[in-house]
Image: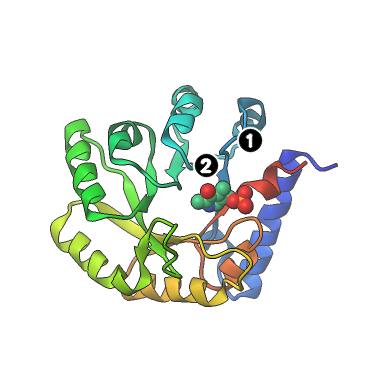
Amino acid sequence: MPSILENVSQIKQTIAARAKSAGRNPSDVELLIVTKRQELANILPLLENGERIFGENRVQEASAKWTTLKKDFPEIELHLIGHLQSNKVKEAITLFNVIQSLDSLKLADKLCREEKRQGKRLQYYVEINMANEPQKSGIALQEAQTFLNNLRENYDLQVVGLMCIPLQKVDPTSYFKNLTALATENELPKISMGMSSDYEIAIDCGATVVRIGQAIFRT
Ligand SMILES: *Cc1c(COP(=O)(O)O)cnc(C)c1O
C-alpha cells in the first residue's frame, strides 16, 4: 500500500505531466494539500518532507492544529478553503495566509477592518458558485463581474484569484473553463479548482492551484 508521501510524489508527477501535455509550465500549477479531518501524525511527515502549502475548511479545527505548527514551520502557507463566518474573521486573519472563500461584501468589509486592526495583509480568492446551486456558498456566476468591480473599487483587499467547487457527478469542464475566462478578464493570476477526482481536467482548463485531500491520505 502506498504511503502518504508516495501519494504526494505520484500526484506531483501527474500534475507536472498533465500541465506539460496541456502546453503549460508545470511550475504554474501548485498542489494545495487539504488536511481537514487529518491528525498531526499524518501532517508531520509532509512538513518534514518539505511540503508547505496546506488547506483547511474550518477555522476552529485549523486553529487547533496549525497554530503551533506555524510557529515551528514559519514558511507554511495556510489556505482557508471553506466558508468563513463573520464571527471567525479575527481568528482567520490571525491564522491564515490566504482565504479562498471570499463570498460577500459584508465579509469583505469585516476582513478589511480586521486586517487594519492586526496590521496584516492576506491574499484572497473570490469563491464563485458556478452552477448557482442554492445550498452552496459563493457568488453566482451571473453576479461575479459586478461583485469583482465593487470589490476592486471599494475594498482594500489583495484579491489575487478565483475559486470554485463544481457540482459533483457532472462533467466540470465547462465550469472550469468559465472560471478561467472570468479570472483572465479580470487579470487575476490565481485559479483554484480541481480536487482528487477532477484535478487533471482542472489543469487542462487552466487551474493554478489544485486542492487535494483524499487522493493523498488514502493509503
Ligand atoms: C475537502 C475539500 C477539498 C479536497 O477534496 P478531496 O476530494 O478530498 O480531494 C477541496 N476543496 C474543498 C473546498 C474541500 O472542502
User: In the figure, is residue 168 to the left or right of 124?
Assistant: right
Query: Which residue, given by chain and number where applicable, does mark 2 sit on?
Result: 54
User: In the figure, is residue 198 to the left or right of 99?
Assistant: right
Query: Which residue, given by chain and number where applicable, does mark 1 sit on?
Result: 46
Does the rendering let one see residue 169?
A: yes
Q: Residues within 10 Å of mark 1 (few under 14, many from 20)?
A: some
Q: Residue at x 44, y 69 (%)?
A: 130
Q: Quadrant of residue 197?
A: bottom right
Q: Residue at x 44, y 57 (%)?
A: 136
Secondary structure found at label 2: strand
Query: Mark 1 vs mark 2: which is more N-terminal?
Result: 1
Percent coordinates x, y for residue 17 in the rendering: 68, 65
- 30 or 139: which is nearer to us? 139
How many numbered marks have been drawn onto this rendered protein structure? 2
Nearest-to-viewer mark from 1 and 2? 2
Secondary structure found at label 1: helix
Q: Is residue 186 above or below residue 89?
A: below
Does the rendering let one see residue 32?
A: no
Residue type of the residue flagged with mark 2? Phe
Q: Quadrant of residue 179?
A: bottom left
User: In the figure, is residue 115 to the left or right of 101?
Assistant: left
Q: Mark 1 and 2 residues: CB-CB less than 8 Å, in contact?
A: yes
User: In the figure, is residue 116 to the left or right of 21?
Assistant: left
